[in-house]
Image: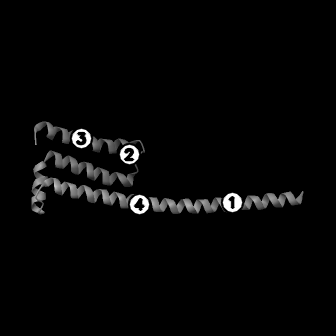
Amino acid sequence: MTLATHILTIALSFCVVLLVIVLLRRNMLREKYVVIWLVTGLSAVIASIWPSLVSSLSRFLGFGVPSNFLFLINGVLLLLISIQLSAEISILEHQTELLAEEVALIKLRIQVVEDHCGEAE
């Protein structure tokens, strides 16, 4: 890895960590998601500062090329994030259905009260 590439990867890794912190401070990212993104960003910082660590770890685990190891790690990370977000969407869909049912019941009660008041006049 050339010096310019090394500096670029370190800078980009720090930018990811800073972006996560800024999004958290602006309430644009919830705390429960911050952990996974900070772990990802800090892992990228460590891997970019010590690229030999990635090479050694990939050799230890039996990967021929370190990029294959990183590809697997990124794939697993994206899979976990997709599962997390799918679970969140399922919960939100269920809550939306409950709210729609409650609104329908409230409208029905209002209609019954209006009809009752109309008959009383």
Residue mark closest to the camera, 4 vs 3: 4
Determine the residue located farthest toward the top in the rendered image. 4
Residue 115 in the figure: left or right of residue 78: right
Mark-to-mark CA distance, 4 and 3 = 28 Å
Q: Earlier in the sequence, mark 1 or mark 4?
A: 4
Would you identify the image quadrant in which residue 32 lies? bottom left
Q: Earlier in the sequence, mark 2 or mark 3?
A: 3
Mark-to-mark CA distance, 1 and 4 = 30 Å
Q: Which residue does the image show at 35% across and 41% down from the upper left?
A: 22
Residue mark closest to the camera, 2 vs 3: 3
Determine the residue located farthest toward the right in the rendered image. 121
Tell me the kind of residue under disc 2.
Leu
Q: Which residue does the image show at 32% across and 42% down from the upper left?
A: 19
In the structure shown, which secondary structural element does the residue marked by tag 4 occupy? helix
Q: Earlier in the sequence, mark 3 or mark 1?
A: 3
> What residue did someone put label 1 on?
106
Asked whether disc 3 touches disc 1, contact meaning CB atoms under 8 Å apart, the reply is no
Q: Earlier in the sequence, mark 4 or mark 3?
A: 3
Residue mark closest to the camera, 1 vs 4: 4
In the structure shown, which secondary structural element does the residue marked by tag 1 occupy? helix
* Residue 77 percent coordinates (x, y): 28, 57
Q: Earlier in the sequence, mark 2 or mark 1?
A: 2
> What residue did someone put label 4 on?
86
Q: Which residue does the image show at 21% across and 55% down from the upper left?
A: 71
Q: Which residue does the image show at 33% across and 45% down from the upper left?
A: 20
* Residue 78 percent coordinates (x, y): 31, 56
Q: Which mark is residue 12?
A: 3
- Picture quarter with the C terminus: bottom right
Residue mark closest to the camera, 4 vs 2: 4
> What residue did someone put label 2 on?
24
Mark-to-mark CA distance, 4 and 2 = 21 Å
Tell me the kind of residue under disc 1.
Ile
